[in-house]
Image (spheres, rainbow, N blue to C red):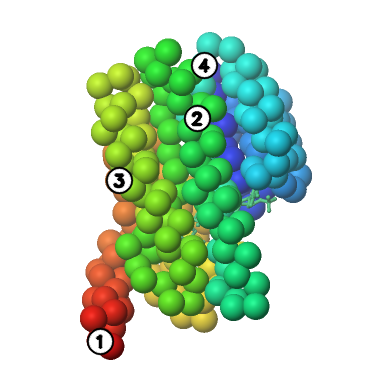
Amino acid sequence: MPQAIIIGNSDGIGLALTTALLEKGWDVTGISRSQSPITGDRYRHHVVDIRSDEYDGAVAQALDRAGRGIDLCVYCAGIGEEIDFDHLDADIAVFEVNLIGLVRTVSLVLPGMLAAGRGHLIGLSSQGDSFLNVDAPSYSASKAGMSSYLEALALAVRNRGVFVTNVRFGFVATKMAKADTRPFEISAEKAATCMLRCVDKRPIRYTYPRRMAALLWLANGINRVRTWVK
Ligand SMILES: NC(=O)c1ccc[n+]([C@@H]2O[C@H](COP(=O)([O-])OP(=O)(O)OC[C@H]3O[C@@H](n4cnc5c(N)ncnc54)[C@H](OP(=O)(O)O)[C@@H]3O)[C@@H](O)[C@H]2O)c1
């Protein structure tokens, strides 16, 4: 039975992906700060904050349980905050969860995959990774770091039997999507279906929907021009 660890799956895309993998017969361990609504013989959950000292132990337990090694690790955890000039320290948490949490996870999971010569690591970045996001600079900057890290890592391990995928969605209808206008928004279930395709095909970069990428490219052009004007 294929084994997966899904980090950040009490809600949103991670929850939809966990449900979809279980339906397909996978054995799944989930990690988040809240309990999971999912129960079942092939599912177990660790309640832990990625930023805490206990996180490494929770991942180690999930890896131990898999025994012969895990097939898939998906980093779905993420937060995003609008900039608040009275509380700029909130931006630190955004980088810690989105970017440092991913790097920490890679340091725990990738060595075993490389030793086994197999495994697939997926990170949920965002199409916002190349956008100068004036409302939430820390979110897009953390996603830029994620995308760059994941794609370079994918190239670094490509000849060692291990695959790394950077997933870049536009808007997905979860509690994270707070913007008043959300063009081309998809459901969490549709996002999970896209991710199953990634599990199957193992691309280095997966962007969906592409229409949103075109829109962001135009919007970003305007922001880039604004940086040239004094
Ligand atoms: N929704 C969108 O429009 C969209 C678009 C593009 C990319 N993405 C990316 O997709 C990923 C998932 O987003 P989503 O929309 O599914 O958001 P979500 O519904 O808010 O889910 C985020 C998950 O991350 C977990 N999490 C957050 N902080 C954590 C921490 N410190 N420790 C452990 N778990 C933590 C949450 O669980 P707990 O709160 O229980 O810990 C939750 O399960 C994020 O990286 C996001 O940036 C989302």
Q: Earlier in the sequence, mark 4 or mark 3?
A: 4
Q: Marks 4 and 2: in contact by CB < 8 Å?
A: no
Q: Marks 1 and 2: in contact by CB < 8 Å?
A: no
* Other residues around mark 4 within 10 Å, as few (<14) / some (14–19) / many (≥20): many
* Other residues around mark 1 within 10 Å, as few (<14) / some (14–19) / many (≥20): few
* Image mark for residue 205: 3
Q: Earlier in the sequence, mark 2 or mark 3?
A: 2
Label 1, secondary structure: give it.
Answer: loop
* Label 1 to label 4: alpha-carbon separation: 53 Å
* Label 4 to label 3: alpha-carbon separation: 24 Å
Q: Position of residue 68 (x, y in %)?
A: 53, 11
Asked whether, in this view, residue 38 is left or right of residue 135, the answer is right
Asked whether, in this view, residue 215 is left or right of residue 45, the answer is left
Asked whether, in this view, residue 209 is left or right of residue 50, the answer is left
Residue at the limit of the structure toward the front, as seen here: 230
Residue under label 4:
69
* Residue type (three-letter) at the residue carrying disc 1: Val
For the point 35% across and 24% down, the residue is 162
Q: Position of residue 77 (x, y in %)?
A: 57, 48
Q: Earlier in the sequence, mark 1 or mark 4?
A: 4
* Image mark for residue 229: 1
Residue under label 2:
107
Label 2, secondary structure: give it.
Answer: helix
* Label 2 to label 1: alpha-carbon separation: 42 Å
